[in-house]
Amino acid sequence: MMQWLLFVQYVSNLNNKVLLTIFMLFCCGVSLTAQEIHSGQSTLSIVDLGAEQFGLKLSRNGLLTVYEQHSPLAVEVVTSDTHSVYYYGAYTSMESLENGIYRCNGHLVSPNGSIFGFEDIYQKSTGNGIFEVNRTVTVKRVGKGDIGFSTQMAFQRSELSSMNDYDFFAPAIWYKENSYVSDNALAADLNENGFWFREDRMPMPVFMLYQKDNGATFSVFHKNADGETFLGEDGLPRIIDGRMKFAAMGMENSHQPLVGMVYPGTEGDRTGIWGMSSEERTALRAHPVELGYEQKYEMAFSLHHELDYPKALKNTWQKYYALSVPKLYEVDLSEVYNDQIGVLKRYWKEIKGTAGLPFRIKLNGQIESHLDYNFNMGFVGQQTGNAYLLIREGLNTEDDELLSKGEQMIKFWVDNGIMPSGIPRTWYDPYPQTWRNDYPTHMRVVGDGMSGILAAWNQERKNGRDKPEWLAACKKVADWLSTIQNKDGSFYQQYNFNTGALVNSSKNNTSNIIPFLVDLYFITGIQKYRQMVLRAGEFVFEDVYKNYKYAGGAADNPNITDKESASMALRAFLAIYDMEKQNKWLDAAQQTAHFYQTWVFSWEVPLPKNDPKMVFPNDREVTGLSQIATGNNGADTYAAIDAFNFYRLYLYSGDQQLLHFSKLLLRNTKQYMNWDDGDPIEGMAPGFLGEAVNVTIPRGHGVGFFLPWQIYNMLEPMILISDVFQIKGYDIETVESISELIKRERHQAYSDTHGLIKL
C-alpha cells in the first residue's frame, strides 16, 4: 500500500506527456525499473522505459522526481545549406560496471544517414550530492550533405513552472532575477528562450537554478573543461572546426526549464561576441561531421536543498571549486613589491607646483602624451593611496626622496582639493592647470581618496611626525558628509563640487564611505562619526545584504551588477564588525565574499599561441583575473586588493576554500605583471601589467596601458599581511606558519584598531 501511495505522489508531479508514457507502459504490461546511484540525499536513476529504451531521473530521497531526461541523446546536425535541426533519442543499452558505475549507449541517425554514437558513463562524484557523466560522441557514418554537428547534455524540470519560480546563477552574468543589469547584458530579458553562455566568459563553467518555494537547487558544471579555441574563431556566422573545445552552459526557457551544456559552445539567444547588444543574436559553433571524429566532455551535476539563494550560490560555487582547485602561481612577492615602488618613483612628477603620477602609461613604459599626467584622487587614479605607499616606504627605508614625493602629493590634495564647504574636488589637470568641472564628486572617489590621506597621516604619526592639517582635512570632509547623509543613513552618489548640488541620486555607493569613517572614528573617538557609520551600515545591510544587491561599485560604470560593489561592501561590513563586534556584520561580509569570488577566474582558459595582438602573455594563465561587470566582456586584476580581507574571513570561519582563494588573489593576480627578469613579458616595461583584457574572444586582447591604480591594488593587501602579522615578506604561507595563538592575537589587535594611532 505504501509503495502505491508513493507511486501516486510521483505520478501527480509529472506532466501530461510523461503521464501518457507511463499509462501506455502499464497498459502494455511493461514495468518501469531503474538502476540507481546515490549521492547525499539525491538519487540518479537510469530508467527502463521499455522497448529497449532508457532514460534518466534525478530525485530527492529516491521519491520525488525533480529533473529528468527521457531523451538524453541530443545532436544538432548542420547541413550544407547551413540549416540545422536537433534530433533526440533515448539510450538503447545500459550496462552496470563495477562500484556503482553505469555505461549507457545509443545512437542517432540524421535524415541524410549520418550516425552519431553516444557512450555516457555515469557515477557518483567525490563531492556530496554530485554526480558525473563522462560522454563520448563518435561520428560512425557520414551522410551526404551533413557538414557539422553539436551535442547537448541536459536535464529537464519534471513539473510545469515559470521563470519567476526560480533564482539563477551564472558567474559574472546572472544573479537571482538579474534586476540590476543594463539592457544590453546577457540574460537581461527573462522572456527570451535560450540562455546559453560561452564558458570562457564565466569565471567557472557552472549554471544553477534555485527554486524559490522549496529550495530545490540544481546545478551543472563542465568538469575538466578544456576551453581551447583558435585565432580567428570570432563572429556570429556558423563556424565548423574541430579545434574548438569550449562549451556553453545554461538553459532553455520553457514551462519545464532544460538545464545543461552545449558542445561546442554556441552562445545565444544573446551573445557578447562583437560587443553586448539587446538584440537576439546567436554565435553558432559546430564540429565537423567527419568519420571517426570524437567529442569528449564531462559534466558534473547536483540536486540538493538549500535554505536560501545565498547559501545555494555559496555551496554550488564551493563544491565545484573543490572539483577543480586552481593551481597557485609561483611568484616572488618581494620582487613584486620592489618593482611597484620603483614604478612609483620612476613616474612621479612635479608639474608647476603640483605633484603626482600619470593617469596611464603605455605598456612599453612610454608616456604617450603630456596630457596623460592628470590626477584622480581615488578610484582609477589612486593618487593619495599611492602617495601613502611612497611615504610608508620612505619612512621604513629612510629614503628621503620617496618620503618627499609622497608628502608633496598629499599636500597638494589637502591644500587644494577641498572646498570651503568640505566637499572634495577629485580630478585635476596640470596641463592646463584646472579642475575638471564636468567630473562631479563621486562617493567612490571620495572614499578611496580620503582613506589614502588618512593612511598617510597615520604613517607619519607612527613615525613621530605630526601632520595636523592632513587630519583636519579628513575631518572637514567627514563633517561635510554628515550634512548630506540621508535620513535612512544612505549617501547619494554624486555632487557638484562648486555648488554642492546633487548630481546623481543613486544610493548604491553608500558603502564606499564607511571604511574611511570607521578609521576616522578609531583615530578621533568622535561619536558623530560612529553614528554616521552605524546609520550608513544599517542602510547597506538592508539594501545590499538582505536584497542581495551588489551594484554600482565603479564610478565609470555605475548602477549595474559588478564585482567592485562587492569589494566595497566587503570592506564596509568588515570595518563595521571591527568597530562594533556584532556578528550580523560578519555574516554580511561572508555573504558578500561568496558573491564576490564568483567573479574571479578559477579555471584555466587557454589563450591562442599565435595572436600578435594579444596583450596578455600567452605563457601565463588567466586564473586570478576577474570579470569587471555584467554586460561587459572585460576582465582585470582588481580583486588582488582583497586578498587580505578574504584571509581575514578564513580566520573567522575556518573555511579552507576561503584560505585557498585568498592565496589565489594574492599570487595569481601577478601573472599579468612583468615582475620576473627570468621570464619577461615581451613588449612590457619592468613592473608593468595591463589594465584590462578579454578572457572570452578575442582572448588576450585588451587595454595597451598600465594605470597606477593597479599598484595600490597590488600592494595594499601585501602590506597589511606583512604589517598585521609582523612577518618578513608578504606571503600568506608565511603567516600560516605562525602559531595559531600568535596569529589570532595579531589579527585581533588589527580588528580592534586597524593599526591606527588614537589621539
Image: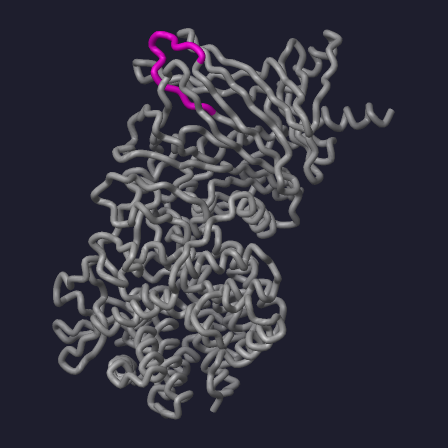
Q: Nearer the viewer, residue 409 or 745?
A: 745
Q: Is residue 69 left or right of residue 719?
A: right
Percent position of residue 407, x then y: 28, 83
From the viewer's perspective, is 374 left or right of 529? left
Residue 255 magenta-drawn? Answer: no
Relative to 460, is 562 above or below?
above
Rendering quarter of residue 209 = top right
The part of the image, by quadrant, that contains residue 229 is: top left
Q: Is residue 271 above or below residue 239?
A: below
Residue 691 in the image: above or below residue 222: below
Instruction: Pick the residue in front: 190 or 604.
Output: 604
Asked whether 141 falls inside the magenta stretch, the response is: yes
* Range shown magenta: 140-151
Hey, which residue is sitting farthest front in the picture? 678
Q: Residue 586: x and y, percent?
A: 58, 66
Specify whether 728 is left or right of 156.
left
